[in-house]
Amino acid sequence: MTGGIPASDPAEIAAAHLAAGRTAEARALYEEVLRAEPTHVRALCGLGAVALRGGETARALELTGHAVAIAPDDGISVGNLGVIYLARNELALAEDCLCRALDLAPDRAELHANMASLYLARGDAAMALIAQQRAVELAAGDPAQLFNLANVLVAAGREDEAAEVYRSVLALRPGHAGALNNLSILHKQAGDLDAAAACLSEARLHDPLNPELLANHADLLLQGGRPEEALATMQRAAGLAPAHPQIRASLGAMLLELGRLAEAGAELATALRAAPSDARIAFELARLLRRQGRFDAAQSALDRMSGPHGGGAAAEALAAELLLLRGRCEEAWERLARAAPDGGSLLPQPLAGQEIRLVAADAAASLFAARFLPLLAERGAVPTVLATPPLAALLATARGVAAVLPAGHVDFAALAEDGVPTLLLDELPRLLRVTPDMAPAAAFAVPPAAPPAAVRDRRRIGVWWEGPGPGGALASALCGEDAVELVSLQTGPARQAGAALLDRPGVVDRGLGIADYRDLAAEIAGLDLVIAPDGPVAHLAAGLGIETWVLVGRDFSWYWPVAAAASPWYPGSRSFMQAADGSWTAALAAIRAALADRPPPVTAVSSGPGRPAAPD
């Protein structure tokens, strides 16, 4: 017996099917009950829950609203209505229903779990955890409430604890498809695709037609390098739940990754019509529009996202990027400042004589930010930089830095004890509210490794291929140009991708003599041009004032222009973009054509320091 209902009651059996994810069986039983008794409250609510799982929120609202009209004092029905309003992102109505439901049935665990979902929708993970823990207390040993607790822990960023709770659910109910699916997602996020696949395979044994499981499987196939199977699987998931906006959004996101932009746009638009306040769908649509270069439309899509922070850190970062791409720097920095946990102001005031410690974490972002160290010094600050050994020697040549200390590992807690303000070097552009006109022509004082020849008719072009680009195909595309002396700068394991090219005529290999970024900068300083993927080498070359051609991914960063025009941050740069389908063929062909159009250089003798040039 449960709540006075015999275990043989079809509505209770249907509820068990629904809890186990067997929606088809649940729907059939609920419909059978309603044919016999059209005002059966539990069956109406259950069928509403089935509709909600399929993304049919209007149908769910109709069925559950009918149940509440029949039994307005039934806390479970009122709570279910609140869940539907929550799914529609109508948070005020959801709160009204859930509070009334708790007044009617304060000891029902599922109502406290629903309140936890409301708190999560409002971005309050701490209150959500309190509400869900109360639900677990009221339903001790109930796998459903433990499952909900694990989901709240994930939302709170406590993935390790969540994984343990999912395992507790599986100990109580082996084969729980939801727990297996969510464990699979955690494994996938941690990069363990084999463990993710194993969990998902077991989940699908218990619920083979669950569209959410199919969507997860499709994502795993895509990450495993099987795009055609991935797309077919995701399309099957969408076919099983054609009105489910999140699954249609997942299909749109996958089409976006595969470069099928028109189809992606159609799917995301359909999903957004079904769930106009869904932040994730709006975010994916904004990504699509950004990739198309439609920055104003992308910003409009982001503006549809609700909540105190728009759609979280990722949405705020994308919104700021869109502003930066449109040259609206001050608005971008202000937006990032509002979203920052520190409130956007880490710089102490006044700065005169103030020591400030800057930590260089990400190489590319640090090389960009180091260009603005003079602005900090001009305001009277005394900047000290902590950097990894490969970066330290180069950053010591940056204007405006008082000292650079090599540091392989940074303990921020220990640094905080001496009272010196410590922040990431990456944050300096935001904190100083920089604009392109503030950037110096050359950021680092590094003499070239070799003086240029008196007159030469071949351009010295440095190439680096490690990073998000075509790899060794970049060096291959440049070989064979008669007017080009190709200088390989590549170091480390990535040299193997171009190993067959290093002994070819017209190629000079300088990579073995490069131990750190200062060595690399010295080699770059004697070149006419550097070609590299978006990354630290491109920032280094452009920051030295060397003409730089950048292979830019289809989700291009704001540092580089969309088309072949020069970046406002690096006037000597030019971009060559990856195609929408992920290929680099057109970009490499454009580079070869651009090289053919350039006149040969004429270089005067230099008496500057350096060693003899490498022989051809």
Image (spheres, helix red, strand yellow):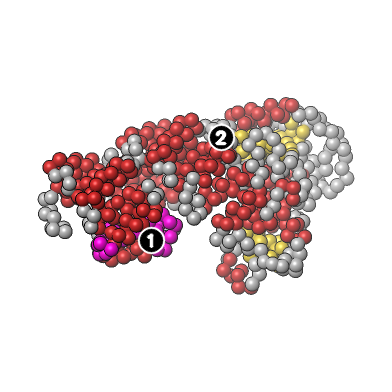
What residue is drawn where x is 52% and y is 53%?
A: 313
Q: Is residue 222 something that shows in the picture?
A: no
Q: Residues within 10 Å of mark 1 (few under 14, many from 20)?
A: many
Q: Dividing the image into 4 quarters, which one contains the C terminus?
A: top right
At label 2, the amino acid type is Gln
Q: Are marks 2 and 1 in contact (CB under 8 Å)?
A: no
Query: Which residue is located at x 30 percent, y 51 percent?
Result: 81
User: Residue 556 versus residue 488: which sits nearer the camera?
Assistant: 556
Q: Nearer the viewer, residue 143 or 123?
A: 123
Q: Secondary structure at mark 2?
A: loop
Q: CA distance from mark 2 to mark 1?
A: 38 Å
Quick one: SS at disc 1? helix
Q: Which residue is mark 1?
A: 128
Q: Which mark is residue 19?
A: none
Q: Is residue 46 left or right of residue 126?
A: left
To which quarter of the image does residue 589 belong?
top right
Instruction: Name the residue carrying label 2.
Output: 292
Q: Is residue 55 above or below residue 68?
A: above
Residue 307 appears anywhere in the view: yes
Q: Main secondary structure of the magenta part?
A: helix
Please indicate whether residue 289 sits to the left or right of residue 136 in the image. Answer: right
Sequence-wise, the earlier of marks 2 and 1 is 1
- Report the residue at 35% width, 40% height from top: 244
- Above or below for 335 versus 494: below
Is residue 574 depicted above or below 596 in this figure? below
Q: Position of residue 236 (x, y in %)?
A: 34, 34
> Which region of the structure is painted magenta?
103-127
